[in-house]
Image (cartoon, grey):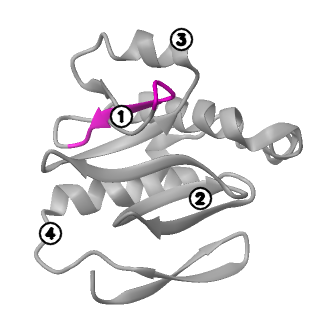
Amino acid sequence: MGQTATRRSRGKSRRLPTEPSGVVSLKGHVLERLRALCLALPETSEKASWGHPNFRAGKRTFAAFERVGGRPSMAFRLDRTEVLRLVRRKQFFETPYGRGLWVSLWADEPVDWSLVSNLVLRSFRTVAGKRRSAALDASGCARLEPRRMQ
């Protein structure tokens, strides 16, 4: 990671690493759409840590874009029951570091953006707390529209 760029969420500027040159365009496309969904939520930010972008509600991470075994993936913080239900599906796997509380979706296969939008919202609500969840309800973002993100 070499260069940096400024990312804005709710009026705050941040300096974050940009993607290195020569990355597969699919990765950039998927990351940009995930970023747009996550940063559309109230009081969210992006922070690069552990070598990849993480999306936070306050100080708690609710989504991430990362490589696992050399493959791009999106990770979401959910409750154990949801993780167990989702890992039965081919495109999902239990996030290696997640202690049963994170599920990942392969991003190098066709992505169902309605599903990703739903996972982003559920993940956000899992970590956001009452005040941020109420802000989400008041903001009208209670249903993210993936088609608008294209």
Q: Are marks 2 and 3 in contact (CB under 8 Å)?
A: no
Q: Which mark is residue 39?
A: 2
Whole-number angstrom distance, CA of label 3 to CA of label 4: 35 Å
Inter-mark Cα distance, 2 to 3: 26 Å
Q: Residue at x 59, y 40 (%)?
A: 144
Residue type indicated by callout 2:
Leu
Under mark 4, the amino acid is Val
Q: Is residue 70 above or below residue 32?
A: above
| Helix, strand or loop status at disc 2 | helix
Which numbered disc, 1 or 3, marks the residue that appears first in the sequence? Answer: 3
Q: Earlier in the sequence, mark 1 or mark 2?
A: 2
Q: Residue furthest bottom?
A: 3
- Amino acid on which disc 3 is placed: Thr
Residue visible at 74% across and 43% down in the picture: 128
Mark 1–mark 2 Cα distance, whole angstroms, equals 22 Å
First in residue order: circle 2 vs circle 3: 2
State the mark number for residue 23: 4
Q: Residue at x 28, y 44 (%)?
A: 73
Q: Give the mark nearer the N terminus: 2 vs 4.
A: 4
* Label 4, label 1: how far apart the Cα atoms are: 23 Å
User: In the image, is 132 to the left or to the right of 61?
Assistant: right
Residue ID for mark 3: 81
**SS of the residue at dot 3?**
helix
Magenta-tinted stretch: 99-107
Give me the residue at 22% from left, 57% from top. 27
| Residue with the mark numbered 1 | 95
Mark 1 secondary-structure assignment: loop
